[in-house]
Amino acid sequence: MKIKCHDKYNDQDLIIIIGDGEYTDYEINRPSYSSSDGLGYKIVIVFQNQVGDKDNCNPKRWSDLEGFEIIG
């Protein structure tokens, strides 16, 4: 899944890629652990810049991200 958003702290548009294509639907939906608090999953999350420095696109805080749009 790809999600477009804006990082207001760094003033940049980002693409968030959840999963990297190596996982099947079965593997993504298989929990990696469970406890009394709920289920846990291990999924790869990749951040990419729309424009600019591809090596400097890590957002500081999740709360700085706004304007989410699913693009793929």
Image (cartoon, rainbow, N blue to C red):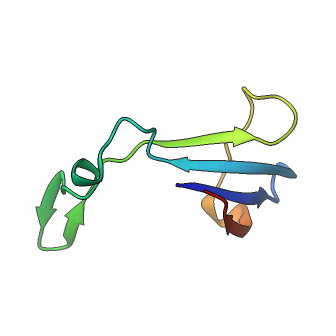
Residue at 19%, 73% in the rendered image: 37
Q: Position of residue 6 (x, y in %)?
A: 79, 59
Left or right of 19: which side holds 5? Answer: right
Q: Is residue 24 or residue 47 the one in the foreground?
A: 24
Q: Position of residue 42 (x, y in %)?
A: 30, 47
Residue lying at 81% horizontally and 42% vertically, measured from the top left: 50
Q: Is residue 52 left or right of residue 24?
A: right
Residue 52 is situated, as x and y percent measured from the top left of the image, at: 87, 33
Q: Is residue 66 above or below residue 4?
A: below
Dividing the picture into quadrants, the one containing residue 35 is bottom left
Quadrant of the image containing the C terminus: bottom right
Query: Residue 30, position in %: x, y?
Result: 18, 55
Q: Residue at x 46, y 38 (%)?
A: 20
The tally of labels here is 0
Residue 56 found in image quarter: top right
Is 72 in front, or is 41?
72
**What residue is at 72 percent from the left and 62 percent from the top?**
64
Instruction: From the viewer's perspective, tell me whether residue 31 is left or right of residue 55.
Output: left
On the image, which quarter does residue 67 sit in? bottom right
